[in-house]
Image: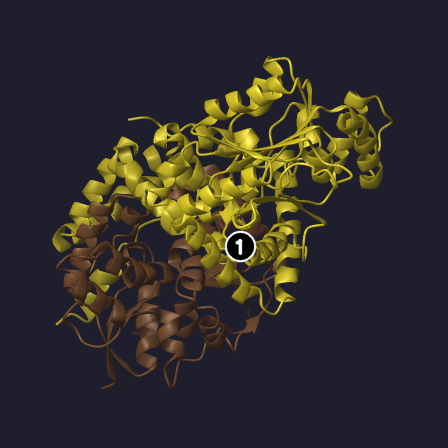
Amino acid sequence: MQGSQVQLFVTCLVDALAPQVGRSTLAALESAGCDVAFPEGQTCCGQPAFNVGLNDRAREMAEHTLDVLDGSEGPVVLPSGSCTEMIVHHYPQLFAGTDREEQAKRVAGRTRELSQFLADQENPPPAGCAGCTVAYHYSCHGLRGLGLDTTADALLDGVDRVPLEGDRECCGFGGLFSVEMPAVSAAIMDEKLDRVLASGADVLVGSDISCLMHLEGGLRRRGAETKVKHIAELLGAADDV
Amino acid sequence: MSEPVTFLARAEALVGTHEANAIDNGARTLLKKRDAVAADFPIMEELRDRARAIRLHALNNLDRLLAHFADRVEEQGGVVHFAGDAEEARSIIAAILDETSSKLVVKSKSMVSEEIELNDHLQSRGVEVVETDLGEYIVQLAGDTPSHIIAPVLHMTRQDVGGLFEDQLDVDYTDDPTELNQIARDHLREQFLRADAGISGVNLAVSESGSVVIVTNEGNGRLTTTAPRVHIALMGMERIVSRWEDAAVVLEVLAKSATGQRLSVYTNVITGPRRPEDNDGPEQVHVVIIDNGRSEILAGETAEILACIRCGACLNVCPVFRSVGGHAYGTVYSGPVGSVVTPGLHGMEPWWELPYASTLCGACEEVCPIRIQIPSMLLKLRQRAASEGRLPGWLEKGMTRYTRTATTPEKWRRAKKWAFWLTAPMSSRGWIRRIPGPGRGWTDYRDFPRPAKESFGEWWRLKRGS
């Protein structure tokens, strides 16, 4: 298959903790007709350091990521709204007035979140979740940071969606906030989980593995049956690649 | 290096309490009203843009607007005082009360008076101070502090208030809001008539006419500023607009964002003391304009926070605020706006951790009528805290190690493998129930996924690599 070239940046969490989401992302992109490349040497976008205010560390990781991505062809696609926002909005700020500024803007201009990219394709893959009901959680950085309030809806058109109260409210993850202020993070999570359970959904779906592993970890602690999946897992099967 | 204790300790004590639940319910009710009125108002978004432009213009011309305002107030027979800090403000107010032999003071709601801890100071000088805003009256009766910038007793239910009135005012228990209101009104009416001076806040000063505007929903502000002989208005020095047409826009978005009202019930405009032809009004009007750290904020990276009109919408929408309430923040200004204002007014020590009391979800900026970029400012304050070496050692050292790994692909590859093997003893079926060390915060409340045996990068190298 010789489709348009796409660079896959899987993000550190998917790489190390949820590789099946990376393979599903790959499958979804390929079934949309993309020729997917995986830029070698990719690690972490630097957001964890940026969010706690350690900008020098963030800049080091951003420089590494820019060097990994710059020079490749086509859009850079990430299965994460949060890391996409880091590259799109914060890289140009981090390097403003430096000799990296042009490079940061160049890469930022090519970078897309997965649902954003797929919803724009002529033939996005159909979402599948046979016999199950789906609740969708809109993660904050994709929703408010990138303004992606309809792209996932478009992709999930074919699945049995159930309403989730407060689906645009934060889940309480917040990066290192979840570890620095765990009681507060968990209080916000608990309200979210109550609503997920009240929705009656079989599967909770989202577009950011960070929020999802926090919510899944909470559901497991409660002994709940609800499954948690990244939207990529509904759009492509990890075993198909 | 200090440990982050204040917010965290207070917050942990508040999570899941009766108080936090009351806050969550109350904040959500206010927010629903705000959303309903905003959706019903066709030019809300346009008004927000205009309000933002008006407030930023005011900040950029603050010295000129304040000077003009002061001249106009004095032309009308009022007196303007500038106070550099809280102590100076308290002395000025105490001196006015001394000179006018004022022994009983009624107050309408003023966050600045809380900021400068006025009540304690006046009471220690033998002045009796009575709060007349229903919420503040309850706070005063309970010996408590406000938990929300516009709804001081958001942390109490009406049953709580009924119990308090029964204990403190020697009345029969009721939790009917109308009856509770009447009880407070009966107790307050007499104070208004006896009071020597009234102290109010200022929602907005209008430079062109030298007027101060006070909005309330209870009418207590009107009595406070007209019944006693002396009126003292306290304002933060940023709380000003240039013209009346600017004030109209700001008052529109204020009422809608704060309480979901089209306009507050009472909009009082005070332009100087009573004139000979007036039927009522105070003999003296004093406006105390307070800096108390604002100049420093204005000169720094978070200057835009001074454009805030104190509607409280960012509190109502904040998941952190809703989980813990205003008391967790340790000062009168809570929630997202407080986390920017407080370190600015009172310094980074010990307030530097407030900017970390946020998930950076962005809901505050989305709801703010002035579209203040609060998350960006929280990040700037975090950068300042980090560069001042305030972060806990494990975080700073850990991030340095992580950065070294993440900028060396070979180390990254090995680290992923180690992560899988090292977590073997603590894992069960792909999940970790307890992480030792700083990561414990995670597993105190949730499971953590075990790192994969084969990372995505490894999989690609083996299956797809060239």
Left or right placement of residue B341 versus residue B161 in this view: left
Chain in brown colour: A
Image colour assigned to chain B: yellow
Left or right placement of residue B424 versus residue B320 in this view: left
x and y, in percent, of residue B412 in the image? 18, 52
Give the total number of marks visible in the rendering.
1
The residue at 42%/46% (across/down) is B64
For label 1, the SS is loop
Chain of the residue under label 1: B
Q: Residue furthest front?
A: B276
Is residue B337 in view?
A: yes
The residue at 45%/51% (across/down) is B58
Is residue B430 in view?
A: no
The quarter of the picture where the N terminus of chain B appears is: top left
The residue at 19%/71% (across/down) is B464
As rendered, which of B275 and B58 lies closer to the eye? Answer: B275
Amino acid type, label 1: Arg
x and y, in percent, of residue B431 in the image? 39, 48
x and y, in percent, of residue A119 in the image? 41, 78
Q: Answer above or below: position of B57 versus B299.
A: below
As rendered, which of A22 and B16 lies closer to the eye? Answer: B16
Left or right placement of residue B110 versus residue A14 in this view: right
Left or right placement of residue B398 versus residue A149 in this view: left
Q: Residue furthest right?
A: B172
| Residue carrying label 1 | B243
The quarter of the picture where the C terminus of chain B appears is: bottom left
x and y, in percent, of residue B177 in the image? 80, 40
